[in-house]
Amino acid sequence: MRLALVTETFPPEVNGVSMTLGRLVNGLAGKGYQVQVVRPSQVSDLDEMGTSDSLYDELVMPGMPLPGYEGLRMGRPEGCRLLREWTAAKPDLVHVATEGPLGLAALWVARVLQIPTSSTFHTNFHQYTGHYKIGLIKDFILVFLRITHNSCGCTLAPTKQMADELKAMGFKNTSVLSRGVDTELFSPDRRDEQLRAEWGAAPEDRVVAYVGRVASEKNIDLAVKAFRRSQTDSRKSIMVIVGDGPERLRLQTKYPDIVFAGMRKGEDLARHYASSDIFLFPSITETFGNVVTEALSSGLAVVTYDYAAGRELIESGVDGLLATFDQPDQFIESARVAMGLDAEALSTLRMQARETAMAVSWDRVIQEFKQSLEIVKNRDRKMYANAL
């Protein structure tokens, strides 16, 4: 299959959507797909020629800053250029991974050229509005998202819970495409006592971590509050925040005793995970939450809400701890329980977390993605043929 995947974000940008798409693209290319990634120019680009040594081709479009997210860009609606490109070399299917201007242009061109389309739902943009003081347009954004995704042959959500919620909101042809985790990269074996010492933690101390975008929708203040409430005089504990974003300066000023490690990638990121003991993730705006699987794979005791990746993967009290969705007091109590575990109980919980992650395979996810794309391609081709 010749697949054109259109996205506003892609590696080397660091976020859950970007890293997921990178995995999917490389996986499909490894299975014989001819993949063209259509993306905007990134801050990290030295030029706009794309990569020459990858398994896939890149079509790099002009980019513009994404408001409120320094370092991220969205693509301009370059429909005319896409029309020229795809008229000359027509894809078998266009997959719209993000709902930005570039994705909308791709949907228009696909409709003109009668190319089957599919989409993924990665981000609850309509839930972000309250965090960025634009709550009045929440309903408009939801209508926009629904129209965009209903223009595609299917919408793939990361969990059954999310797919059911989308269906209830009027999204059509929803299905599930889960997420995998690299268990070789994210491993307890990467624990580094020297790094812990740099944080001020001795081997017997507890290190509590948050990893992800440092942004208001991630609810990081609650993670800090839970950490504070769980500290005891009998055991030293340290909190580390890994990541960057618009809230970092405010949080760093407000909490000077917390370690802010900044953006980390690859093995360095895996080392930061594995050198921690407990992972707090209080976000309530996730469609999945890749960091939860990475923390589980790294052998951390994960505390999160009972939804998204937490609901899919964690049995509370066995391989992590879950709090009722959007109940801050319960989240704080779950963090207190995790912090209060003795060494043996914490070790057992962490080993079970690793076992859970070992069953989450990217190969399986990529195969599911491939099957979904084949179904949409064949169905939409028949639809266009019957319309002629």
Image: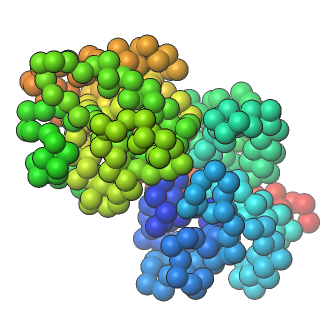
Image quarter (top left, top right, bottom left or bottom right) of the N terminus: bottom right
Quick check: 359 left or right of 85? left
Residue name at image x 11 percent, y 52 percent: 194
Residue 251: x, y in percent?
44, 39
Q: Nearer the viewer, residue 166 or 18?
A: 18
On the rendered structure, is 279 left or right of 56? left
Residue 353 in sight in this render: no
Look at 75% across and 52% down and name the residue there. Answer: 152
Q: How many marks?
A: 0
264 or 101, nearer to the observer: 264
Residue 265 visible somewhere in the drawing: yes
Residue in the picture at 63% in, 78% down: 59
Please name the colour scheme applied to the rendered image.
Answer: rainbow
> Which quarter of the figure is the C terminus placed in?
bottom right
Q: Position of residue 101 (x, y in %)?
A: 76, 60
Question: Left of 347 or right of it: where is 144?
Answer: right
Residue 213 versus residue 25: which sits nearer the camera? 213
In this rendering, the answer to whether 162 lies above or below 323 is below
Question: In the image, residue 211 lies at what x, y percent?
Answer: 37, 44
Find residue 228 and report its image quarter. top left
Above/below status of 231 relative to 269: above
User: Picture coordinates of residue 224 (x, y %)?
Assistant: 38, 29
When asked about the image quadrant of residue 317, the answer is: top left
